[in-house]
Every structure is written in structure tokens, then in C-alpha cells.
């Protein structure tokens, strides 16, 4: 049984689908970029080495000669040229602390552009109060462990999962959930202002083309995890963030799910590399009190093997707008197949109240692989 009735009373998290809490670290933006991640990476270096070695094993399994890893270690840092802003210095600092070659840290940062399969939801209650929830599903095709029916990389990401409090002058600028070693952001919020999650969009004109263009010297597009981080770091309002996410050229197609701090401020931006195809917004007057985004354009049917949209909507409809809360949002995100073998963590965000919670997840058998 891969699907199930909408779960109830799963919050506060406990039981077999709850793996544990996610630790908090402070990232001090007043430090030089090279030093910002030292404390965190000193703690997480062993776990990062395990996953980097897994990726190497996967690459070597496809291309046994070892040539690709040689290119990654020796050529990639030069090929990728200058990353924008602080990112290159931050990655150099991470490489220095962990003892992992810079090329492999770069690869670890790049590969998030390709394997994130997620569910993001924004809801609005009868009082106009917004909530934003997401399941971070990661690691499709990256090694299935037949001994315990898990995705190898998904399991290895759980110990790397961290909550980050980015601060300037000892004050929070934004909070985010991420994987240690990755300097982009896929999930985060700016207390009082907006929340943002990024879901991958599968498209023929996919990320690979953007990466190739980037390597060949066309540097006018942004890495999607980096633009999300820059918006969280520098954005001043929902509208400004929305404008940036609609207009910036990006390296891979994506969905940006953006929530604000007042009624009607919630949207899914469907992006191609060069332009926005669709902006779908909350509209409480027309009873559109939630938006749900997985990894397929909303005007198309999801892949029949991978329909998380329908069960998520069904459970939200059953919950009703009157009863939406962190608890009932967590119920929806705990219902299979919205919860699946790829789910690393669930994040719940309340921008207005400044509440931010992340929980590691498990999906015990029977459970679908994605």
C-alpha cells in the first residue's frame, strides 16, 4: 500500500515516521565568507565525507575509468570560473576545514540543482494568517540500498541536515534548513516578511544546458540555490522577492514557492531558465486558500508514477480552511506518498509569528520509493 488515508494527530512529531530533531547553527554574516562555515563544518566533516564518497562511487559506477573524478578534482574549480558574491570564498573555506578537495565541494553544491523532488504548500486561514510547509525529498536515482529499502544518498543526508540562523550584528537576517556543505538555500524564511522554498522542475531544457553554458563562459544566469539564498539574505518584502524570482535568469528550470505576511500573499512561480511561465496565487475571495506544488506544471498531469499533488490537495480539502495549523499541515506532509522514501525532512514556517520548525523523517515499509 503506497497511498493511505490522510494522517491525523501526527504532531507534535513522534512514532515511526519521525527520525529526530534537526540541530540549529548560527552563521555569522559579519565574518569573512571564508570563515562563516568553520564551526558547522568542523562538526559535520565526517558526514560530508561519507556522502561525497558515495557520489564518487556512483560516478565511478557509471564511468569506471576514474576520469570524471580526476576532472572534478583537477579541472572543475577552474572550469566553473567565478561564482557570484561570497559563494566561492565560502566553498573554499568549507574545503579547507573538511579537507575535501574544492572540486568535490563544488560538485556537492551543483548537484542540488538536479535531484530535489519536493512538495511545498502555502495555506491561508479564515483570519488571513499564512503558513508554509514543505517536504524536502532528495536523492532520486542516487543508489538504492536493497538491504533496507532506502535511498543511499537520502539516508546520508539526514545527518547533514541543519537549521541555520543567519545573523548580522547578532540579529537574525533569515533562517533556513539545508545540508551542511551546501551554500545555496532551498528552504527558508525572513521572519515577519516572507518564506521561500524551491522545487525542481523537470524540463527538457533542463539544468544541464545551463551548466554547460556557464562552464563555456556565459555567466549571466544564476544558480537556483544561490538566487534563493540571495533573496532570503537581501530581500526586503514579498513583492520585491517575487519580482526578483520572476525576472532573474536562472541555470535550471524551477518552481519558487513564495509566501508573504498578509492575506493573498502566496504564489507558485513556474520558471523556465529565461522567463516566468506562470504565477499562481492564493485567492481567498475565490476560495483558493492554499497552493500546492510538487515537481510538475500545475496545468499538466503529474507523472502517473509520481502523483503527490492529488493526495496533498485531497488531505488539505479534508482538513478544511477552518482547521489549518502547523499540526494539520504536518499531517498532510506525513501522508504517503507525500511522505516517501526520498523525504529527508519536513519544515513548517509561520512568517508572522516567527516560528520555524524542521523534523527529520522516515517512511517505514510499505512505502513508495518516491
Image: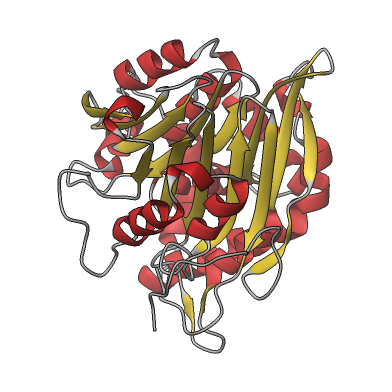
Instruction: Give how far across and how far down residue 331 sits, in percent.
Output: 54, 59
Instruction: Give how far across and how far down residue 199 sits, in percent.
Output: 40, 43
- Give the quadrant of the C terminus: bottom left
Residue 74 visible in this rendered orientation of the protein: no
Q: Nearer the viewer, residue 35 or 229?
A: 229
Residue 159 visible in this rendered orientation of the protein: yes
Look at 66% across and 64% down and name the residue there. Answer: 50
- Give the quadrant of the N terminus: bottom left
Seen in the picture, residue 271 relative to 367 is either above or below; the reply is above
Taking the view exactly as shown, the residue that stands out farthest to the bottom is: 147
Seen in the picture, residue 81 relative to 117 is either above or below; the reply is above
Look at 47% across and 41% down and name the residue there. Answer: 76
Q: Nearer the viewer, residue 61 or 301?
A: 301
Instruction: Give how far across and how far down residue 352 sits, in percent.
Output: 63, 24
Indicate left or right for 92 with 274 as reference. Answer: right
Instruction: Give how far across and how far down residue 130 sits, in percent.
Output: 52, 31
Amino acid at each position: 500500500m503506497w497511498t493511505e488515508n490522510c494522517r491525523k494527530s501526527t504532531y507534535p512529531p513522534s512514532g515511526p515516521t519521525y527520525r529526530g530533531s534537526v540541530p540549529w547553527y548560527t552563521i555569522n554574516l559579519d565574518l569573512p565568507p571564508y570563515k562563516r562555515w568553520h564551526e558547522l563544518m568542523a562538526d559535520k566533516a565526517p558526514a560530508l565525507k561519507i556522502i561525497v564518497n558515495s557520489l564518487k562511487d556512483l560516478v565511478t559506477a557509471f564511468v569506471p575509468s576514474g576520469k570524471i573524478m580526476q576532472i572534478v578534482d583537477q579541472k572543475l574549480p577552474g572550469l566553473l570560473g567565478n561564482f557570484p558574491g561570497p559563494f566561492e570564498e565560502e566553498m573554499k573555506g568549507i574545503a579547507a576545514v573538511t579537507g575535501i578537495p574544492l572540486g568535490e565541494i563544488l560538485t556537492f553544491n551543483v548537484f542540488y540543482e538536479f535531484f530535489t523532488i519536493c512538495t511545498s504548500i502555502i495555506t491561508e486561514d479564515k483570519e488571513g494568517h499564512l503558513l508554509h510547509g514543505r517536504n524536502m525529498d532528495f536523492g532520486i536515482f542516487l543508489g538504492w540500498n536493497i538491504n533496507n529499502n532506502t535511498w543511499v544518498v537520502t539516508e546520508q543526508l539526514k545527518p547533514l541536515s541543519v537549521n541555520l540562523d543567519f545573523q548580522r550584528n547578532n540579529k537574525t537576517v533569515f533562517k533556513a534548513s539545508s545540508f551542511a556543505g551546501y551554500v545555496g538555500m532551498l528552504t527558508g524564511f525572513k521572519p515577519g516578511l516572507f518564506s521561500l522554498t524551491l522545487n525542481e522542475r523537470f524540463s527538457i531544457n533542463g539544468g544541464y544546458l545551463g551548466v554547460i553554458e556557464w562552464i563555456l563562459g556565459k555567466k549571466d544566469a544564476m544558480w537556483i540555490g544561490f538566487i534563493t539564498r540571495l533573496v532570503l539574505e537581501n530581500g526586503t518584502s514579498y513583492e520585491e522577492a517575487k519580482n526578483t524570482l520572476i525576472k532573474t535568469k536562472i541555470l535550471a528550470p524551477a518552481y519558487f514557492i513564495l509566501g508573504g505576511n498578509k492575506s493573498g500573499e502566496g504564489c507558485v512561480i513556474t520558471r523556465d531558465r529565461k522567463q516566468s511561465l506562470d504565477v499562481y496565487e492564493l485567492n481567498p475571495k475565490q476560495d483558493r486558500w492554499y497552493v500546492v506544488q510538487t515537481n510538475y506544471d500545475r496545468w499538466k498531469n503529474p507523472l502517473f508514477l509520481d502523483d503527490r499533488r492529488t493526495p496533498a490537495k485531497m488531505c488539505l480539502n479534508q482538513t478544511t480552511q477552518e482547521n489549518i495549523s502547523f499540526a494539520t499541515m504536518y499531517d498532510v506532509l506525513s501522508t504517503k506518498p507525500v511522505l516517501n522514501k526520498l523525504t529527508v525532512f519536513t519544515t513548517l514556517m509561520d512568517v508572522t509569528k516567527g516560528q520555524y520548525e524542521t523534523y527529520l523523517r522516515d517512511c517505514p515499509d510499505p512505502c513508495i520509493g518516491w
